[in-house]
Image: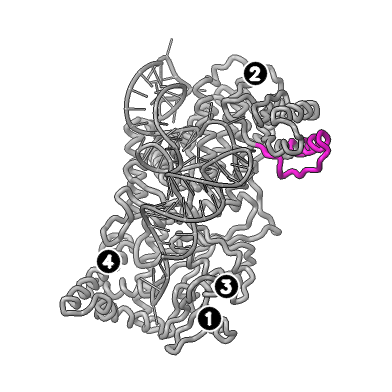
Amino acid sequence: MNLETELKIAIVDIVEYLYQTQITQDIVQFQKTKKEFEGDITLVVFPFVKISKRSPEQTCQEIGENLKDKIEFISDFNVIKGFLNISISTDFWLQQLNVISKDKNFGEKVADENSDLMMIEYSSPNTNKPLHLGHIRNNLLGFSIAEIQKANGWKVVKTNIVNDRGIHICKSMLAWQLFGNGETPETRKIKGDHLVGEYYVAFDKAYKAEIKSLMEGGMSEEEAKKEAPLIKQAQEMLLKWEQGDAEIRQLWQTMNGWVYKGFDETYKELGVDFDKIYYESETYTEGKSKVEEGVEKNIFYKREDDSVWADLTSDGLDEKLLLRADGTSVYMTQDIGTAKLRYDEYPIKKMVYVVGNEQNYHFQVLSILLDKLGFEWGKDLVHFSYGMVELPEGKMKSREGTVVDADALVAEMIATAKNTSEELGKLDGISEKEANEIVRMVGLGALKYFILKVDPRKNMTFNPKESIDFNGNTGPFIQYTHARICSVLRKADEQKIDYSNLNNLQFEVSEKEKYLIQLLTEYPNIVQQAGLEFSPALIANYIYELVKEYNQFYHDFYILREENEDLKTFRLLLSETIATVIKKGMKLLGIGVPDRM
RNA sequence: GGCUCCGUAGCUUAACUGUAUAGAGUAUCUGACUACGGAUCAGAAGGUUGCAGGUUAGAAUCCUGCCGGAGUCACCA
């Protein structure tokens, strides 16, 4: 039983005894005692004032006295206004530290056969251009959420739905046919996704030129966009693709193959992976049949031109297109199909879509449609929505070339980490191979931590120049602290100091150290809370707090020079446990922590 | 225009289901290196939490109305 639960039960008893009123545990509220006050945990007594019919101070005093009598590990208490600050005995904290240090699964639940399954969809790229900064946020969030859910005892299936078909890839294909001269990633010596991306841009450029000349010929912009020969050709190509035209299919497979190879490299760099990949080309027909089924059941309706619509006005939304007049499917149709396939394949208890907040409306609609179609899980799907990543100059726009390419960014982060390390001479005497690994961890750690520490819902500003900061609330600062602890522990091992157990208690534990242990005991709560909230930011900020506190402590004491052997042992054990929790927490963020750096 | 989300020190941001003097980092200024790893630490300064009301013993947090920003309301995905 943890500290709070034990206190809660006792407090309910005391309040009921003192004031002869039945109460529930919900109104017993704790918070961590603020640093400027003495104590470890604070009870907010305002909720009891009405019951006690006494002043807040008096109520505090009465509860405090009874609590101290009743519970052994309470060493003292003090009252400030309506806050009862409770001090917990040193013995209690030492016991906690002993328990934590021995629990290999501390803070983590392990899934077994009976655990429920959660499917998390993330990444979901189009195959017409390389991944950019926005995808990085998506991938990091998706991966981290999956890790956090695993630590909360879920069976997790990470999935990726690749938008490998549609007008967008036809545009790239067409441009390659027209201007490509048979180029391949090998002949150009660039990644396949970048090559295909170039053709997508080339199409856009040529298309724009056509529109311009049509408009000069007197056509309206709207009309010109529809009538431009290039877009007509692309649409024709899509139709041919859907009809299974052999030549088009062949080209499509080749070019998508290039892209997948490129994506795989990027995913590997970022350290994210998937358990199951779906391709829209394989799932979109499934959606069609489901929509037609809906028409038969009169859930959807057909217009004169044969297009299929859902009327959601009764839900306060608009009418939504599901099948075009030519029978081709749209985004929504595909998501319906994919959902069906997934639930046929896995016993999904919870479905999570990690998708940007520009699609909030889409998922609101999807949820309603799935519900109408009779999928019982439709209503409960979770859209993990996150904000856009902006640059200091403003929004990223592919046309203006202000998109930050994922591969280039990762490379830049690693290069900067390397430069900094070399300047400081940190990696002297380490093999080149190990040095490269460390530099990778640091560069990626900086990027990942920077993105994950921000509340996902918020739009964030990413400054490529300032992002690589090795001070303050950053990944490298945390990694550095971990490396330093490891260094101390290595030295302790060299001196053959055994710090695995705390036996005699012939020393004084400082307030700071008690606070550190208290922070450690909170780790499981943080993991659980992050699971409920789906927020890696919670974990990130917790680790930073732990690291910051430890650094202050570290600065004040020279552990290995400590003359009191018991105290030395204690501090080593505390350091080791903190290092372990840092490592665990960073793992939930998908960030590696080196033993030296 | 309708709906959704956001607005916190110069900048980047925290505050769990309301609760003590709204925490950090960064930039600025001051101080600490015979250093278990200084990529560190201590201190100063920096806030009308967009504005105005309301609910409450108590509001950055909940409600209402404004202001500002973003997104969406596509036969794009």
Where in the figure is residue A589, as x and y percent of width and height? Answer: 51, 47
- Using the image as rendered, state which of residue A118 and residue A278 is in the foreground: A118
Q: CA distance from mark 2 to mark 4?
A: 68 Å
Comparing marks 3 and 4, which lies closer to the viewer? Answer: 3
Crowd band around label 3 with a 10 angstrom C-alpha radius: few (<14), some (14–19), many (20+): some
- Helix or strand or loop: what does disc 2 sit on? loop
The residue that appears at 45% across and 73% down in the rendered structure is: A331
Q: CA distance from mark 3 to mark 4?
A: 36 Å
Comparing marks 1 and 4, which lies closer to the viewer? Answer: 1
Q: Which residues are magenta?
A: A7-30
> Same chain, marks 1 and 2?
yes
Q: Compared with residue B50, is residue A322 higher up or lower down, i.e. above or below?
A: below
- The type of residue carrying mark 1 is Val
Where in the figure is residue A10, as x and y percent of width and height? Answer: 78, 36
- The type of residue carrying mark 2 is Glu
- Helix or strand or loop: what does disc 1 sit on? helix
In magenta stretch: residue A28: yes
> Between disc 1 and disc 2, whose residue precedes?
1
> Between disc 3 and disc 4, whose residue precedes?
4
Q: Which residue is mark 1?
A: A291
> Same chain, marks 2 and 4?
yes
Is label 3 in contact with label 4 (beta carbons under 8 Å)? Answer: no
Q: Which residue is mark 2?
A: A508
Circle number at residue A201: 4
Q: Which residue is mark 3?
A: A370
